């Protein structure tokens, strides 16, 4: 596209934004020599460059190294935003050197990386340690704050290496990456075949405690990642051998200690969200959404639920196999008589055909701040909120409505002050409703009786009701605690 060496002076040295659209014949964007001149570049946007295979090509080295451990650094000191979209043949960001030198591609100030619709891409970040006589290449994003990767049908991993640190990453969005099953992997790691994962018990979590460091990540969205069997390690002590459980808990907490917003949808191989041994990382979680995970039978175990001390909003939608929100089977941990969601204010249950109860265990469920329970669509098996225990809801007003499918998505961006924000369109749809009935002082409401009565009125004579029938119904059904309006 340009000559490797720029004349002196050259206006391109002051280039701040580079956008390339619909350039079908480009095989690469920049040579390594040219890339070194773009010291003022702040934004790089590429769209529909069908023939491009790499962004930066390393040509024959102009510098010879006397020592194999020296690095040839290609740096973009001011580049803040990288967006790559519809680059079908892209296989790597930067080619490898043909000589003995080692290159490091450094994006020292890049805050946003957005890669989508690149169907040939198998990995994005390369981090390979070199032995004697073996070259190494490293791509670094030390200041990354927002990472979005979507519609990458052949992506197997984000990072090829043993470990990655994203010390400033706040928002991670992974969408429609059907082959992605782990965030970081080296050449010796093996994928788990779908036909054997349930038989052998072999698991490879998306985020391994030993390979990923994400201390500031606040927002995590996973969608259409059908190769993900587990999101995080169920039992960190298995990997750490003789390490104590307390030390393992500290390790987990360091990975997701800042996580506030978690949304998981259309991940068909997940059958649970949190286990007891993986829950100590989520003490700051405030919003939890799970949707269309067809194998998921429950969200978390009783011990895991006890650590969600700041959770304010929880929504579960269209999980066909889900029978409970908190598991109560004999295999799971359950030696506590009290389960309390101290800060939960809103609970949404939408179109859960197998859901029988929030929890069937024999214990007390306490929701001191819960003010609203919303049931949307068809939950024909939901006959009680707690099967065998006691429920304490001193501030509850119950609002059950039946309506059409609600849009379920989020948007993440950076505001004028540089703060990462998330707009949740699903929960926002429940934030204000002119028809909602408010009970100012609350009351010790028996939600079990409420749900049982609602089931009798709506499903007792129509147990064969299906979601399609409800979607055809334009009416909305409201159940208010006071007045019993239907």
Image (tube, rainbow, N blue to C red):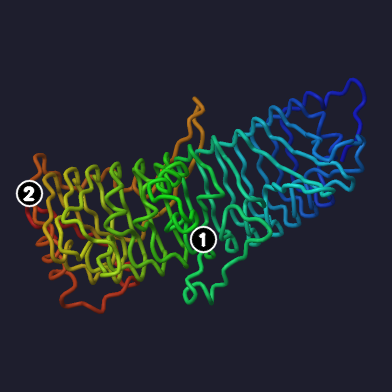
Q: Quadrant of the N terminus?
A: top right
Residue 224: image tag: 1
Residue shown at 20% from the left, 49% from the top: 340
Q: Nearer the viewer, residue 375 or 95?
A: 95
- Report helix, strand or loop for mark 2: loop
Residue shown at 92% from the left, 31% from the top: 5
Q: Do residues under tags 2 and 1 come within 8 Å of each other at their CB atoms?
A: no
Q: Quadrant of residue 449?
A: bottom left
**131 over 5 or under it: above or below:** below
Q: Earlier in the sequence, mark 2 or mark 1?
A: 1
Q: Quadrant of the C terminus?
A: bottom left
State the image coordinates of residue 50 (x, y, percent, origin top left).
77, 54
| Residue at which label 2 appears | 444
Q: Nearer the viewer, residue 23 or 295?
A: 295
Report the label total.
2
Q: In this orientation, does residue 3 appear? A: no
Q: Quadrant of residue 102?
A: top right
- From this viewpoint, which residue is outermost toward the top? 9
Q: CA distance from mark 2 to mark 1?
A: 41 Å
State the image coordinates of residue 25 (x, y, percent, origin top left).
84, 51
Residue shown at 90% from the left, 39% from the top: 61
- Report helix, strand or loop for mark 1: loop
Q: In this orientation, does residue 444 appear? A: yes
Residue 189: image tag: none
Q: Residues within 10 Å of mark 2 (few under 14, many from 20)?
A: few
Q: Nearer the viewer, residue 224 or 239?
A: 239
State the image coordinates of residue 353 (x, y, percent, origin top left).
30, 70
Q: In the shown orientation, is residue 274 left or right of residue 137?
A: left
State the image coordinates of residue 283 (x, y, percent, origin top left).
34, 43
Residue shown at 80% from the left, 39% from the top: 69
Q: In the shown orientation, is residue 129 left or right of residue 428?
A: right
């Amino acid at each position: 596209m340009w000559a490797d060496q720029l004349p002196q002076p050259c206006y391109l040295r002051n280039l701040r934004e580079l956008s390339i659209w619909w350039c079908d014949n480009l095989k690469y964007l920049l040579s390594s020599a040219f890339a070194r001149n773009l010291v003022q570049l702040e934004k790089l946007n590429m769209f529909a460059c069908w023939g491009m295979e790499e962004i930066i090509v390393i040509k024959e080295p102009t510098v010879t190294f006397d020592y194999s451990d020296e690095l040839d650094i290609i740096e973009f000191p001011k580049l803040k935003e990288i967006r790559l979209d519809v680059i079908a043949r892209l296989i790597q960001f930067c080619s490898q050197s043909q000589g003995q030198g080692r290159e490091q591609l450094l994006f020292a100030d890049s805050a946003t990386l957005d890669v989508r619709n690149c169907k040939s891409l198998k990995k994005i970040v390369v981090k390979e340690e070199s032995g004697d006589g073996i070259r190494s290449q490293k791509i670094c994003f030390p200041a990354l704050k927002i990472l979005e990767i979507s519609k990458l049908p052949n992506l197997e991993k984000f990072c090829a290496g043993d470990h990655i640190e994203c010390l400033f990453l706040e928002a991670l969005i992974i969408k429609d990456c059907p082959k992605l099953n782990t965030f970081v992997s080296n050449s010796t790691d093996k994928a788990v075949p779908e036909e054997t994962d349930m038989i052998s018990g072999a698991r490879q979590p998306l985020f391994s405690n030993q390979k990923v460091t994400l201390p500031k990540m606040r927002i995590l969205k996973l969608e259409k990642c059908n190769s993900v069997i587990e999101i995080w390690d169920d039992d960190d002590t298995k990997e750490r051998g003789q390490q104590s459980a307390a030390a393992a808990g500290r390790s987990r907490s360091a990975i997701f200690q800042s996580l506030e917003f978690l949304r998981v949808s259309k991940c068909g191989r997940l059958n649970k969200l949190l286990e007891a041994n993986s829950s100590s990382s989520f003490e700051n979680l405030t919003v939890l959404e799970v949707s269309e995970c067809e194998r998921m039978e429950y969200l978390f175990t009783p011990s895991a639920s006890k650590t969600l001390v700041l959770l304010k909003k929880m929504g579960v939608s269209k999980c066909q196999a889900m029978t409970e929100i908190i598991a109560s089977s004999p295999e799971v941990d359950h030696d506590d008589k009290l389960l309390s969601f101290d800060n939960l204010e809103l609970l949404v249950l939408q179109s859960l055909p197998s859901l029988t109860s929030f929890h069937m265990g024999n214990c007390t469920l306490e929701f001191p701040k819960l003010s609203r329970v919303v049931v949307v669509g068809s939950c024909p098996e939901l006959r009680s909120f707690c099967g065998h225990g006691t429920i304490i809801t001193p501030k509850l007003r119950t609002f059950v409505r039946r309506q059409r499918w609600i849009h379920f998505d989020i948007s993440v961006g950076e505001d004028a002050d540089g703060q990462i924000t998330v707009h949740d369109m699903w929960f926002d749809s429940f934030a204000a409703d002119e028809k909602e009935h408010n009970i100012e002082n609350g009351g010790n409401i028996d939600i079990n009786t409420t749900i049982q009565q609602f089931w009798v009125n709506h499903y007792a004579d129509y147990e064969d009701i299906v979601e399609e029938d409800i979607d055809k119904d334009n009416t909305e059904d409201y159940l208010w605690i006071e007045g019993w309006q239907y």
